């Protein structure tokens, strides 16, 4: 990443609109994420994997509904307490913070971005370290 243009912080406050949960894309999960999700749903990890995951190359992603909503979207996130890092860290992904222009694209898509409480540069750094970003738009 080039210089941290966002070092003085950025405003973000999720409006719970669910827009980011209802578009085509991958939600990547690792073994630890799967264990948390499976536990929350009182399933074994293999049963969870069979029912809710797809393999993409060497990675695993949640499946989507035919209309591209996240499989756990139910008028809200039905696994919110254990949602994957990608969901927890949005919109503070490397790809979104690449430049003011990429952030502006996020602001246009996500009504919570660019408004509300300011996340400090340190808080954004912490979220970036969780590497929640995706290769494909969320
Ligand atoms: S699109 Fe933005 S405001 Fe809407 S649910 Fe997602 S993060 Fe929250």
Image (cartoon, rainbow, N blue to C red):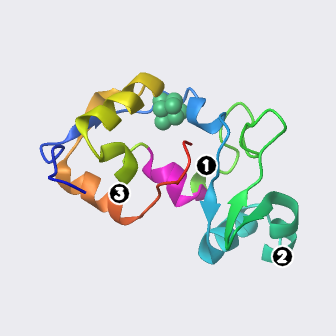
- Say if residue 93 shows up in the picture: no
Q: Which residues are magenta?
A: 82-90
Separation of residues labelled 1 and 3 (CA atoms): 17 Å
Front residue of 69 and 43 = 69
Residue that appears at 25% across and 57% down: 1
Q: Quadrant of residue 11?
A: top left
Q: Relative to 77, does residue 11 appear above or below in the rendering?
A: above
Residue 5's x, y, as percent? 15, 44
Which numbered disc, 2 or 1, marks the residue closer to the eye? Answer: 2
Residue that appears at 87% across and 67% down: 50
Q: Quadrant of residue 115?
A: top left
Give the structural element (helix, strand or loop) at label 3. helix
- The verdict on label 1 being within 8 Å of ligand 1 is no
Looking at marks 2 and 1 on the same chain, the residue that comes earlier in the sequence is marked by: 2
Q: Relative to 13, does residue 137 appear above or below in the rendering?
A: below
- Say if residue 100 shows up in the picture: yes
Give the structural element (helix, strand or loop) at label 1. helix
Which numbered disc, 1 or 3, marks the residue closer to the eye? Answer: 3
Looking at marks 2 and 3 on the same chain, the residue that comes earlier in the sequence is marked by: 2
- The answer to the question of whether label 2 and label 1 lie on touching residues, with beta carbons closer than 8 A, is no
The crowding category of the residue bearing disc 3, from other C-alpha atoms within 10 Å (few below 14, some 14 to 19, many at least 20), is many
- The verdict on label 3 being within 8 Å of ligand 1 is no
Residue at image mark 1 = 80
Residue that appears at 47% across and 55% down: 133
Q: Relative to 81, does residue 76 appear above or below in the rendering?
A: above
Is residue 68 on the magenta stretch?
no
Q: Quadrant of residue 56?
A: bottom right
Front residue of 61 and 39 = 61
Left or right: where does residue 51 sit relative to residue 129?
A: right
Separation of residues labelled 2 and 1 (CA atoms): 21 Å
Q: Which mark is residue 46?
A: 2
């Amino acid at each position: 990443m080039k210089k941290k243009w966002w070092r003085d912080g950025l405003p973000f406050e999720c409006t719970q609109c669910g827009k980011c949960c209802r578009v085509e894309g991958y939600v990547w999960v690792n073994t630890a994420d799967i264990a948390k999700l499976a536990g929350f749903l009182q399933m074994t990890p293999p049963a969870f994997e069979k029912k809710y995951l797809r393999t993409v190359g060497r990675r695993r992603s949640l499946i989507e509904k035919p209309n591209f909503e996240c499989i756990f979207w139910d008028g809200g996130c039905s696994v919110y307490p254990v949602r994957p890092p990608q969901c927890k860290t949005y919109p503070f992904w490397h790809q979104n913070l690449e430049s003011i222009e990429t952030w502006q694209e996020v602001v246009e898509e996500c009504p919570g971005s660019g408004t509300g409480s300011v996340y400090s540069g340190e808080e954004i750094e912490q979220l970036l370290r969780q590497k929640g970003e995706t290769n494909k738009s969320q």
